Image (cartoon, grey):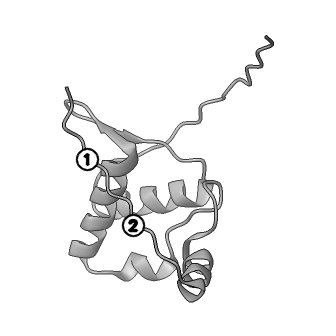
Amino acid sequence: MNNARSTTVQGYSTLMAIFLKSLVGTNSRTKSIPAELYLAPDAFLKGLIDGYFSGVGSVSENTISCSTASEKLQTGLIHILNHKNLTSFYYELQRETVLSQT
């Protein structure tokens, strides 16, 4: 059994919603890493990458991987990883639409 935990934070602020929407996008296809973060201290970038991969990634013996629907987020993650001398690349998966009828 896995002892994984998840935490949800909910906030009710129109101002914060507007800020986050303009900063990182509104859905999975429009997410991005804001340009200002590329100049952030290494400790912050390490936390950003750690948090992202902890949330949606997987770890094997010598590989970490994740997926995203956002091309901008993908590009940003690769940029940060390469800047930190971590070899990274991407590949696209084509999903099939499966319809079922009952």
Image quadrant occupied by the N terminus: top left
Which residue lies under the disc numbered 2?
A: 9
Left or right, 26 with reference to 45:
right
Above or below residue 97? Residue 66 is below
Above or below residue 31? Residue 66 is above
Q: Disc 2 on helix, strand or loop?
A: loop
The type of residue carrying mark 2 is Val
Q: Residue furthest right?
A: 101
Using the image as rendered, state which of residue 85 and residue 62 is in the foreground.
62
- Please report the residue visible at 52 percent of the width from the left and 78 percent of the height from the top: 12
Q: Quadrant of residue 9?
A: bottom left
Q: Quadrant of residue 58?
A: top left
Query: Residue 55: where, in percent of width, then height?
Result: 36, 50
Left or right, 28 with reference to 100:
left
Image quadrant occupied by the C terminus: top right
Which residue lies under the disc numbered 1?
A: 5
Using the image as rendered, state which of residue 75 and residue 95 is in the foreground.
95
Using the image as rendered, state which of residue 23 and residue 15 is in the foreground.
15
The type of residue carrying mark 1 is Arg
Q: Label 2 vs label 1: CA separation?
A: 13 Å
Above or below residue 68? Residue 40 is below
* Crowd class of label 1 (few under 14; some 14 to 19; many from 20; radius 10 Å): few
- Please report the residue visible at 24 percent of the width from the left and 41 percent of the height from the top: 4
